Image (cartoon, helix red, strand yellow):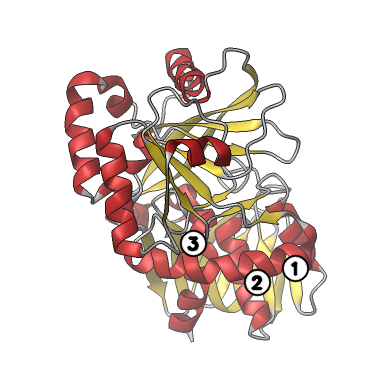
Amino acid sequence: MSDSSTASDLVVVGAGIVGLAHAVEAVRRGMSVTVVERDERAVGASVRNFGHACITAQTGEALSFAEQARETWLRLGGEAGFDVAECGTVVAARSAEEIAALEELSEDRGPDQVRLLAPAEATAAAPVSAEGLHGAALLPRDLRVDQQRAAAAIAEWLAAQPGVRMLWSTPVLGVEEGLVRTGRGSLRGRRVVLCVGHDLDRILPETADAAGMRRCVLQMLQVRAPELRLDPALLTGTSMLRYPALARTEGARALRERWSEQRPELLEASVNHMLTRLPGGDLVVGDTHTYSRTPEPWSSEELDRLLLAETRDLLGRDDLTVVRRWQGVYASAEGEFLRTRISPGVTAVAVTSGIGMTTAFGLAPSVLDSLA
């Protein structure tokens, strides 16, 4: 595959959702693009997630990227042929602290973005148990993306565009100005972006070290609940402790303080208990978080039982069947995004906060602007 004569305008290393977002943006700008990926298809964070574009719960730069990405998701869903639903998110509140956090967010963002729901409205919007329910909030701008199809569909769409090459099963060994060295030969590119997520330490270990990059490993479940229909994403009090727009509220701070005494197991496992629906109707249930440069390879049955117990309690259902179990993984570092100039025309890019699906299509234009 050695190709030292023809240079693409952009070489993208990595065909996960972050890499694909850069390729999509480059095509929009009329650039020639080569995407090189070590696997024969995307099998990492881009397919192991909730399929949830959590827009409203972001802040700052991430919120701006998420809003921009929303429009691209809606456009690409139609052009590339995968499901994108404007289903919104229901955030269930089962304590006084949680409803206070939602009220603070609604006051900050306004009723068009955060609509407060009484308990009866909440149970009508999502199949949650009415027992102990204080209310909820609807975040209507959030999206649901078919995560098991989206990356493959976008890659297929890209491959059909003029000036685009998709190179699969091709490991990248190193990068330098204007050149990407692979196991199949060298590629030339006027600009290069490395979008390899947590595997940055395999190619540029010093860059990963400087960023303090680790792997965040998630435990997740696919659960079957007979005759249950969940259209919006469903978040809980644990989500209020993780998503920044909610975590900064007084209600969330009070909730964390109470749980440190009453529910320490949720905090110790860094649980974000949330549910989304797959196209066939099963639920994606997650997740727990552990952080390490080199994670242990073992899953914890105790953590899976914790997630399942929380789900039974949230839905008021005992007839849940686990269909699949898996570990998600993403890059974790200080801040939400890593953008590091390696050499002239070469930049390493990663979403380091687990919000790649939410923000990648807004992040990519800013990166290409900086390269230009």
Instruction: Report x, y in % for residue 362.
Output: 50, 70
| Location of residue 107 by image quarter | bottom left
Say if 91 sits above or below 262 in the image: below
Q: Residue at x 76, y 57 (%)?
A: 153
Label 1, secondary structure: give it: helix
C-alpha span from label 2 to label 1: 7 Å
- Closer-to-camera residue (157/246): 246
Who's the residue at 73% across and 60% down the image?
A: 155
Q: Nearer the viewer, mark 1 or mark 3?
A: 3
Picture residue at 66% right of the left edge, 48% below the top: 42
Q: Which of pointers 3 and 2 lies earlier in the amino acid sequence? A: 2
From what the image shows, is residue 224 above or below residue 44? above
Instruction: Using the image as rendered, state which of residue 183 and residue 209 is in the foreground.
Output: 209
Residue 158 - label: 1
- Residue type at tag 3: Thr
**Residue 117 rendering spot, x and y as whole percentages:** 44, 46
Kindly identify which residue carries mark 2: 24
For residue 346, the mark is none
Secondary structure found at label 2 = helix
Instruction: Tell me which residue sits at (55%, 43%) in the image.
Output: 233
Query: Quick one: quadrant of the N terminus?
Result: bottom right
CA–CA distance between discs 3 and 2? 14 Å
Which of the marked residues, 2 or 1, is nearer the chain's N terminus? 2
15 sits left or right of 368 in the view: right
The answer to which quarter of the image holds residue 95 is top left
Given the image, on which type of amino acid does mark 2 rest?
A: Val
Nearer to us: label 3 or label 2: 3
Q: Residues within 10 Å of mark 3 (few under 14, many from 20)?
A: many
Near-viewer residue (231 or 18): 231
Read off the residue under disc 3: 359
Disc 1 residue type (three-letter):
Leu
